[in-house]
Image (tube, coloured by chain):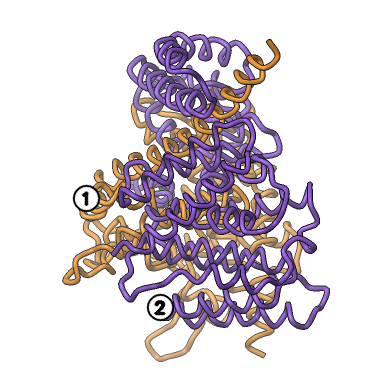
Amino acid sequence: MNDEKRFEILSSLFTQSIRKKIFLGLIPSKDVERFLLPILHNYNEFESKLDKKSKKKINRIFDIYPEIAIKHDIKRKLSVFNYFKMLWLWICVATRVTIDHIKEIHLSPVKVKFAYATIPIITILLAVIYITQEKTSFFSPKMIAEEKKNNLLSEIITQEEASSISTKMIANLSKSIDISKVFKPDSEILKSKHYSFDSCSNPYKTAFNFGRFYAGTELSLESNNVDQLNYYISSFKLMVEKYDHANEIKVLLDNIKNLYLKKSNIRPDINELLNKLKNIINYDEIPYFYLGEWCEISHTLLLLDQEISKDDFFSSKYEIFHVFNSLKDKKLKQGAKDAIQKIKEISAKDHLSEKNIYYFKKHIEQLIKNINKDC
Amino acid sequence: MNDIKQFILTILNSINIEWNYHKSLLLINKIIDALILEYRSSERLLPIADIIEQEKSNIIKSIKKIINNNISINEQYDEIRSYIFKYAICHFPANFDEKQFIVGKHKVSVRYILEDHFGAKPVSDNMKEEDINFEYEKEVFEMIISCVDLKKTEDQIDFFNFFIFEGKTEWRPKTSRYTAMLWFSYLIFEILKYDLKACNESSNYIIKRLKELLNDSINGNILNSDNDGIITDKDGGIWNDSLFAFLSGCKRKEVTKKILKKFNFGHIERSNRALLAQHRDCLIKLAKKKLCQKIQKKEYENE
């Protein structure tokens, strides 16, 4: 080995080590960002002077660390193939969402047929409006909303993880009514909630009942209903028994109860319970959890002698229909499927008449019973 | 008319929500695909690539569960990348020795790494090139990034050629400067580590010490123990384990001379190919900042 090589061996080994770690995603994002910083403000000029192989390498870094490209608004060119792939995906998403919305409004069969026939045109028009509005960078991974701080990952959390339907429903109800006055202890309500549980259980039934008990616990805390809280907490404890984290959840439930009974100013943190439950529920079963939450709040509301409006059940309309739609291809007994269909039909009505309310309650009960019957 | 407008706006908003959700999934898909390609480029990591490829849809599903909204965006993505690797390791068949896939598991002193590579053949069979994990690697990397001037696009290309692109087609004079910066950083670290006074002294003292030690290495004055056991090593032998002792071997005399030349203390070397005063000052300042606190903390703990 000559002296030149000996002089260079340190840099050769050092850069090799750094390179390897960058490309395996082992270097913290902040360090990579600091490393790339000098080129980020004039990236286009920099990239234009690179050869093909180097371009590929720098692009690979942005593939592995996309947050840096998003943060610094690095617009990356798409190949024609990828451009059309993305366009096709957008059209699929737009079509599906448009169909969902059309289904939600009450139209005569002729109008529905007409609407379906015009969906492709509507979608293309929407695409044009969407692009020309320039509210979002269409194909580059940049967020529109400033408050989301360019974090696309928050989209996953918003849609999949952090949202709790019961929290939103209770928050919506509290706008129009005083929840603490509405949900007074009522033994009749509690009795009617004791649906029989058999020994058999399956993951989606468990997720559904977890959702119900979670919503019930939250509702009991909001409405200061000790009896109801005791009922839900003891039901929870029975259900979590067979899970690895049973003790953790039991301690958490006791903490919630104790903190509540102490009547201290510190509000029990129910979100921790939500996170723990979602950790034990399979990802595929999450929609059943949401359905359980919705059923429990809706059913409790229907059992009360209260003036209710459609908005109390379908205020975050898109979300509950998103849940219904995500259950479409999943295993559900025909009875449960029928109940969901009937609930959707009622939701299309302008107002909830007394008759509608009666059937609405009946269908929700049918849904709960059918899911709990399933083994 | 207002109702139709409202209806279209509602649909647009829903599409927007749904589309951003799909974009976030595409983003994660892209990260996974890019990592698979990189793992595939190494024979040793090939099984990891296979597992990630097989388990891709499950990984994406479970990633959604680990995203923690309470940490910074950068950290969220860091967690995702490390999760992908951990997921693959956890899903190996039971008879696999997962330890072999841990990248850069040992932090090794620069002296040990150089000793292993200075000969024609690496001395140690255990240290494959993929395993190399330099001691103070992060610190040195950060120091160099902070001390180079990368305002011009040409300089940026040089720098990225050196670190990322392995661009060897065209000889770039500044590559020599970056190599000199690496040697300089590690030698300064050695001074701060072994000369206990150095942390409290000025840059001039450290430069004086560095020149003196390099000259001693060239003249073979670092290790002077004679056969009778009388130790006359420099400064009572405090440098015996240092990089200076490694450079003091007669075979390394020429390399040491070259290193000294590239440090450019006399401003003789053509400026592009060697260090300038500003680089030296910057590196010393940062090295002191990064290392002295650690050394003092260690001394305090030892007491």
Q: Nearer the viewer, residue B276 or A345?
A: A345
Above or below: residue A295 compared with residue A140? below
- What's the distance in space between the residues labelled 1 and 2, CA to CA? 30 Å
Which chain is orange in the picture? B
Q: Which mark is residue A244?
A: 2
**Kind of residue at badge 2:** Asp
Q: Which quadrant is home to the N terminus of chain B?
A: top right
Q: Is label 1 or label 2 in front?
A: 2
Q: Would you call the spot at circle 1 few (<14 residues within 10 Å), some (14-19), or many (20 or more)?
A: some
Residue denoted by label 1 = B50
**In which image quadrant can residue B82 be found?**
bottom left
Chain A, which colour?
A: purple
Q: Position of residue B46 (x, y in %)?
A: 22, 51
Q: Is residue A241 visible?
A: yes
Are discs 1 and 2 both within one chain? no
Q: Residue A216 at x, y = what percent?
A: 60, 65
Please state the horizontal and vertical placement of residue B274, each as a whole percent of the image.
55, 39
Q: Estimate how packed mark 2 is, as few (under 14), some (14 to 19) or many (20 or more) residues with alpha carbons within 10 Å.
A: few
